Image: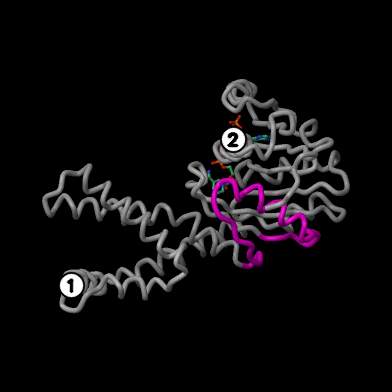
Amino acid sequence: MGIDLSNKKIAVLGAGKLGGTLVQAWMREGLLTKDMIRATVRHPERARSQTEKLHIEVGTDNAQAVRGADIIFICVKPQTVQEVVEEIRPHISAGQLVISVAASVPTGQIENVLGGNTAVVRAMPNTPCGLGAGMTGLCKGRYVTPDQIALACSLFDVVGRTVVVDEKHMDAVTGLSASGPAFIYIILESLAEAGVKVGLPRETATLLAAQMTMGSAKMVLETGDHPAQLKDSVTTPAGCTIDGILELEEGKLRVTLIKAVVKATQRAKELAFNE
Ligand SMILES: NC(=O)c1ccc[n+]([C@@H]2O[C@H](COP(=O)([O-])OP(=O)(O)OC[C@H]3O[C@@H](n4cnc5c(N)ncnc54)[C@H](OP(=O)(O)O)[C@@H]3O)[C@@H](O)[C@H]2O)c1
C-alpha cells in the first residue's frame, strides 16, 4: 500500500518452505526483482536446488547475505535462530530491519543478541500463505518505527492478510491462525465423511465441504457481520439446520474448539520458555 521497495535489498536466511514461498510471491507480484533478493540455506546441495527453483541467488553464507541488506528475513527453524543471529551479529549495521518468522522466538531474544537499537519484527504466518490466502500476525520489537512495521506488513500482504498485534498476543496468533488450518482440515474431513455417510461420492462431499467452508469464511470477512448473525440467517424455524446445530451443541463443538486453541497457545508459550 504505497510502500516503495524499489531500492531495497532483502536477505532471506533459511529459504526453505516458508522463505521460498515468500520469495516466489514477492517476484510473482512484482514487489521485488531477483537482483534485490539474496537467500541462504544450510546445505550447499540445497542451495543449488533452491537457486534453480526460486530463480535467485541462494548460497550458504549468512554473513555475506546480510551485508548491505535493508531487510533481513530470518526463516530458519526456531531452534536455529540463536545460532544464525549470533553469526550475523558482527555484520549488522544501523538502519537494517530484521523480520523473524520463527515460532515462539521473542523479539527481545533477537534484540539482545544483536545489541544496539536493531529493529526486530516478529511475524507468524500460516501455511495457506503458499496459495496467497494466508493470515500473518505481526508484532513490533522495541526499536521498530511505524514505517518499518508498515513495510513488514507489505511483504506479507502479498501472501494473504496481515494484522499487527502486541507481542503478548503472538502465542495466541500461533494457537489460532497458525495451528488453525489443522483444526479446520479435521472439520472439513469430518464434514466430507458425513457427506459420504449420507450417500455422496467422496470427491463430491469433499468439494461441497471445502467450497462451503471457504464461502462461509468469505461471508464473515466481506460482510463484516457477526458469525452468529450469519448463522441465524441460515437457520430457519423448525428447519434442517437447527437440528444439526442441536447435535453440534450436544457434542460440545464450541468448547472443544476453544480448548484446542487454548492448548495450542499454551504450547507456543512453553516452547518460548524452553528455548
Ligand atoms: N511453513 C510455514 O507455513 C510456517 C508458518 C509459520 C511460521 N513458520 C516458521 O518459519 C520457519 C521456517 O519454517 P519452514 O517450514 O520454512 O522450514 P524449512 O522448510 O525446514 O526451512 C528452513 C530452512 O532453513 C535453512 N537453514 C537451516 N540452518 C540454517 C543456517 N544456519 N543458515 C541458513 N539457513 C539455514 C534450511 O536449510 P537446508 O534446507 O539446507 O537444511 C532450510 O532451508 C520456522 O521458524 C517456522 O516456525 C513456518
Disc 1 designates what residue? Answer: 243
Tell me: is circle 1 under 8 Å from ligand 1. no
- Badge 1 local density, few (<14 within 10 Å), some, or many (20+)? few
Q: Which mark is residue 28?
A: 2
Mark 2 lies on a secondary structure that is: helix
Extent of the magenta region: 139-168
As rendered, which of 225 and 272 lies closer to the eye? 225
- Indicate yes or no whether the magenta region holds residue 76: no
Q: Position of residue 86 (x, y in %)?
A: 77, 43
The amino acid type of the residue labelled 1 equals Asp
Q: Position of residue 100 (x, y in %)?
A: 67, 49
Between marks 1 and 2 in the image, the one whose residue lies nearer the viewer: 2
- The residue at 61%/49% (across/down) is 156
Q: In the rendered view, tell whether residue 245 sits above or below residue 140.
A: below
Mark 1 lies on a secondary structure that is: helix
Q: Position of residue 46 (x, y in %)?
A: 59, 25
Q: CA distance from mark 1 to mark 2?
A: 47 Å
Q: Position of residue 158 (x, y in %)?
A: 59, 46
